Each structure stands twice: as structure tokens, then as C-alpha cells.
Image (cartoon, grey):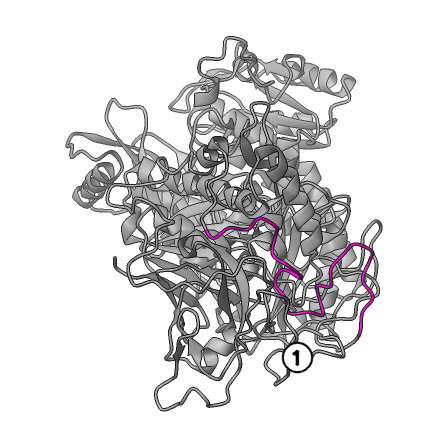
Amino acid sequence: MGYAIGVDVGGTFTDVVLKDTSGAISVAKCLSTHYDPIAGILTGVTRVLAGRDPAQVTRVVHATTLATNAVLERKGVRVAFVTTQGFRAAVPLGRYARVEEDRYDLRFTPPPPPVAPGDCFEVVERVSARGAVLTPLDPDSVRRAAAAITARGIESAAVCLLHAYANPAHERRVAEILRETVPAVVTSSETWPELREYERATTTIMSAYIGPLMASYLSRLRERLAGIGIRAPVHVMESSGGVISAELAARRAVATIESGPAAGVLAAAGAGFADAISFDMGGTTAKTCVVRGGRPEITHEFHVGGKGSFGGRRAGTGVPIKTPAIDLAEVGAGGGSVAWLDPAGALRVGPRSAGSSPGPACYGLGGSEPTVTDANLVLGYLSSASIPLSPALADKALDRLASPLGVTREQAAYAVHEIVSASMASAVHVVTVQRGIDPRGFALVASGGAGPMHAARIAARFGITTVVVPAHCGVASAAGLLSGDLSTDRVQSHLDAPDPAALLTTLAEAAATDLAVPLGTPGVRVHRSVDVRFKGQSHDLTVDWSDDRAELESRFYRRYAEVYGITQRGEIELVSYRVRVSVPADPLANTPVAAAFERTTPDTSTREGHAPESTTHSGNAPGGNAPAPAPAHQPSAGTASAQTEEPGATRTASTSSARGGKAPTGTSGSAPTGSARVGHAAGSSAGEGSTPGSSASEDSAPSGSTCGGSTPGGSAPGGSAPGGSAPAPAPAHQPGAGAASTRTEEPGATCTAGTGARTAGIGTPTAKPGMTSATPTTSTTTRRAYFPECGGYADVPVHTRRTLAAEPDATVEGPAVIEDPESTIVVLPGWTATLTPAQAVHLVRRSR
């Protein structure tokens, strides 16, 4: 038996997925440990192994935000920039295109350059754009630069000589001399030999900036994994969706800047829809990407480290990086995003996040500010049945917004929900409408712990009628890591090379060497492409390579019309040649994913400053990705016990009430209107995220939709066992969910204990063909959730994938909730939900 492990370290949670040779998957989640990311990784890996032999692990694949965080937080190493004489000011001067919010700022201050002017050095040499030596290299000038670098105490250097992509000889010699005294030296011809001097320089600088950090981190990771018995190769997801060895990742660290988000897109690409929009919402950020023809969109230049990364191709959002990357739009909107009031009294959400420490208020780890997770708990979308979330703390946090706004708690909570949905819809707008793509023909694939709660709202803004929630949506990025092949890219700029075939073969051989496999090895795939432009133009487009010049021109013309919306013909020229070499990394990568997950061993150890982390697959992921830490006195999910709660907290792991008590005071039967500011904020981005033909309002239920009766002031009766796991523990006086019992409900509450039938809407049993409503099957329960279409709170059925699988031909009609082990799916009024054989949930909007 062999195992492959995927590890995704996010801003809030660390996800670990283990897959064995049979395709069975086990999942572990724990809060990320920002003081030492490896500590969180070891916690998750130890938990997911759950008694298995660590020596049987054959492969570890890692997605990390280390490079991204180092750039954003400016925590990389100090770098010296070495270039051709006369060009040392190129990087300090830079090229900064102001984003919209800065365009008319009279007090605008440009960001600091990636290298201080005093750390830029020149050497005597010059090469032409065709590779001819115009000025021979002066070795003494290199030694003088090396001495100055050493005197400044700089230990990393980036060498980018003019036109080194055409002739790298001078760069190689400069690096050879510098390495005599400088520990780490990176050259542009090794990193990314492509034309455009400024972009090539910044790419090389960023590689030198984060390279030593990446090398040290991966070395420590291998050592600590070996300490628990795992000596398998460590691979790293690169920005373009491929997987490279840890050694190559250390040498080419710049290729890992978008490592984490890329894995989630791969999972969306495998959801079964050729044309899809990946929507991944975690605890800190939300990412979107377009998948066409089953392949994610790839960009060869993106920006990092600026005021935001909202659309990687958006000029002015940071330092330009010339390396292949999955084309993502990212916003600071997640389950942990903090809701706040600006000086004018308007409600805002994000981009600041509560992260893993202290986390949302309902986690009970010391956080008090209202977050998206707290709002979703107040609205009833999240459950406290088997996760230690505190509705009381969430209520208290939302009251901090409701009071100054002059609205009820649930109105404030729904405004937070709407604002964050509008923010994420803007990211979808960037990758679709702004690029001339009509999103209505696409399926929205939702992942991340918080994504399925917001997906239908976002889809409705664009007229998208199909939402797909994969089987392991809450850990999609970690699972996507195991589907990636070992692959790497090579590029070479050469204007109209006389022998393109020979150049492409040379690049393919170099890429195969990077992967340590012979080019002719069975299973090795080579994809060739070329950058083409109209003669006289400055920018180019990438198309698949063809030896037939006429076919190559035809492909370019089609791509040009697709991107710019106009048909044009003319003489073309070839600019850069690209090769991507891939090889299956592990036989485990192609085994089918099991329909059900295994439960992992609970972690009862404590972490400094926090309570122990809860078991995986025991309930919903709060606000975004994973179970919150459980108090030390609380037993693991699935054990029946009487529990002692902390003062002021409501019982969350032992009761089945969604709200844990009475509904908020002042609940009305109408949708939240609140003050003018709340109404404006909640819909501020609706226009930006809409397309012609989309519905006027996502809040209006289609004709024929069914909503349950709203009983303000009541509590949510019933409980639900998380999908694929044992029922939540119940106190001694209360049987588990689905058991026959007589219970005393609070005034105004209704109790619709699950029967054997699938409920369509509220109280409308729909039996599976050949099965009566009295047939005993897995029970569904109800809880109160807030839907404006229903006039406020309504009792809605709560399903799990297990209850859906019990009646595979039935359809759930919204409003309803489907609880995953690590996330929750909200089915809106007017939408239906079905479970596919692959255990994916498909949400479909009924025609109006």
C-alpha cells in the first residue's frame, strides 16, 4: 500500500489530503500556524496518517504561499541588482501604471522599487538584440561590483544583462565571478530568458529575493517530515499548475508565487465541465479563474506585491513577473474577512481578515470583531451541531454593527453576506465580462470552505444557471495537488529563429533535464507553443506551435479575434518559443477518487495560545475552510456525553439547534432594508458584476419557488449529522438526530423531524420512485435560516451527501442546506440540488 499526500497552506487553514492506491481519500484540517507553517503541516500530516506507516508515503505535494507572502510583506532577502553599464537606473525608475483608485490622487506616492538604487551595480559589456557582442565583458568591472556587494553585506544577487536572452555568455561569466564571494546568484538567462528588459529584470530580482527563503523552508520541511518517518520526495505546485521538485522550486522560486491558488483551479478543471468558472473562497481570500475546453487560462505575465492582486494581468497592481501562471483574479474576501464601518458610517467587508488567530468571534479564540463567518452563523447557513462554534459570540459581534447602523442583527448579518458576495462577484467580472467572455454559458465550480455558501448568489448575478460543488470542495486545493503531473516550462526569445524546430527541441531537452527524465521516456508529453504578433506591433499572443506556417497564421488570427473582438490579417513574426514538458508523477495521481472520505484521528493536543483543534470530517468548516478548535473538555465528534460549556457560551457540539437559542430580538418577516447606507453598500457592486440578460435581482425568488413559514422568535429544532460522518454528540436527555423522541421546543419554534422522504422545499415530501414517505431511510432535519425571498427566517431542510445518496433519483428544492464535512452548501429558493454518482452536488436554477 502506498500513499500520496497533498498539503495546502492557506492564510487561515492548512489542508492535508491523503490518497492511497485504491483511490480512497482521507482529509485533515487544522488552523495555519503563521509563526511556523511547518508546525501546522506536521499536525495535519500526523492526523491524516492516523496509524498508517509513514514509510509507505511515496510522494508529498505542497502548495505554499511562502513566496507570495514574502513579496507582499517585503520579507525577502536583500538583493543586489547587476546589469549592463548605463542601465542601473532601469529598476529604480520602474514602470508604474496607476490603478483606478490612484489615478487622480494628487498626493500619490509610488511604491518603493524592488531594489534600492544604492544596491544596483553595473558591469562593462553589451550584446545586441540579435545576440552579437558589441562590447566584450570586462571581468575587472565584475570583480569591483562583487567587492561592493560583499562590502554592503548582501548575500543574494540578480544578474540581468541587456539582451541576455539572445546570448547568455556574458551573464554566465558574470555569475561565475560573483559566486566566488556572493552565496546566492540568479541570472535572467536561467530564470526566464525572454525579451522585455524591465519585466525580465523584475522577474530575476524576485527569484533572488525569495529563493533563499524557499530553499531554507523546503530543506527544513524535508527534515521535519523525515523526523516523523516520511522520506518521500517533496514536490511543489508551480504557478502554472504543474508540479516541480523541491530542488527545482528552490532554484526557480519565482515560479511558485501563485502556487496555492493554482491547485484549486486544477480541481475545478476536473469537475466535468469543459467551460467553467473556478470560484475558490477560503478563510482569507477568494480566487476566480476561467476554464475553457477543460484547460485553465494561462497568462505569461502577472503582477504581485502592489496594493492588490485583483486580476493578475491588471497593470499597476505590483511588480511584473514574466513566468507562466494560471490567470486568476483574487480579492481579499473570505470567511474570516472583518466587517467594519468606515468614517462615513458605511458598512465595509475586508480586505483585512481575522485569519487563524484570533479568528472569527464565533471560534471562541479571543476574536471579537464581526466577520463573514459570524454573519453566516447568525443567518443559519452554518451549523453548530458538531463544531464548536458559538452563536452567542457571533450574535454579540454582529450587534456591534447593527447598533450603530440602526438595524436588526439579522439585517446587519445579511448586509455583510451581500457585500462580500458582491466583492467576489467583481472578481468573476474581471475574468469574464472585462475580457469579453459571456459567463452565462459557463458552470460555476465552487470550492473552499465558504465558497458553496455564496456560490448560488454570485452565479445569479451573472445569469449562470449551474453551480457545481465537487465532492471534496472544502479541500479542493489540497486534492488538486494530487492530480497535477510533474511538469516544467522553458522559453527562449528569438525573433524569427531560422530553425524553430531545433530551438524547440533544445528547450524540450532542457526541460526534461529539469525533471530528471530522458525526453524519450514513455509517458513524457511535450507541448510546444509560440508567441506571435503582427509585424510592427509590440505585444504578442501565444498559440500552439505548427510546422505549417499557414496553419500557424490561422491559429494566430483566430486567437487575435477571440482576444480583441476584431478580425485582422497581416504579416506576422514569431517572438518567443515555449515548451512545457510533463510526466505522470505517480501512479496514484490517476486513480479514481473514492466517493466517501475516511475520518481521521482527532488531535487532542493543545497548541500555544489555542485550544486543541477539532477532528476533521465532523461538521462544517466555519467561515471558510475547516473546523474551529474545540475546548479541551469537549470530546470528539461522534461520542455521546454531557458537556460543560464555558461561561457565556451556548452549547454547540451537543445540541442540534442551528442558532442555539431564540432568534434575535426584533426579527421581522421582511427582507433586511436597514439604513440607506446598508442598502447601498449591500448592492454597491451589483451593477459591476452583472451582464446583459442576467436577472434584475438575485433576491427575487422565481415563480413557483417554495419557502417555509417564518416564525420569528423561535429556535431551529432538529440536528443533522455531517455528511459522511457519525452524528454529533447529544446530551443525555436528547436522542441523536433522526431518533424518535418527544422534545419540548421553545415558544414559536416548529419541529419537522426528518422522515424517510426527501423534502422538496418545506414540508413537501417527495418520495423516491417505489418508496413511500414512510420508508425508513437516512433522516433529514430542519433548522432556521434567513432568506429574503421567504420574508426572513424560515425552517429549511438540512441534508448531507449521505442523505442525498440514500435517494439518488430525488431532487432537493431550495431553500435548503446541504452540510459537507468541511463546508456548507446553501440552496436558494428557485434552485434545485442533485447528487451525481461522483458525489458532486449540482445546483440548477429553475427557469423563471
Comparing 445 with 111, the one in front is: 445
Give the extent of the magenta segment: 642-669
In the rendered image of this protein, does residue 305 appear above or below residue 653?
A: above
Q: Is residue 774 magenta?
A: no
Occupied quadrant, residue 625: bottom right
- Quadrant that contains the C terminus: bottom left
In percent of width and height, residue 688 lies at 36, 35
Q: Is residue 648 magenta?
A: yes
The residue that label 1 is drawn on is: 736
- For numbered disc 1, what is the local secondary structure? loop
Amino acid type of the residue tagged 1 in the rendering: Gly
In the rendered image of this protein, does residue 232 appear above or below residue 753?
A: above
Comparing 328 with 752, the one in front is: 752
408 to the left or right of 765: right
Q: Main secondary structure of the magenta part?
A: loop
Q: Residue at x 46, y 89 (%)?
A: 774
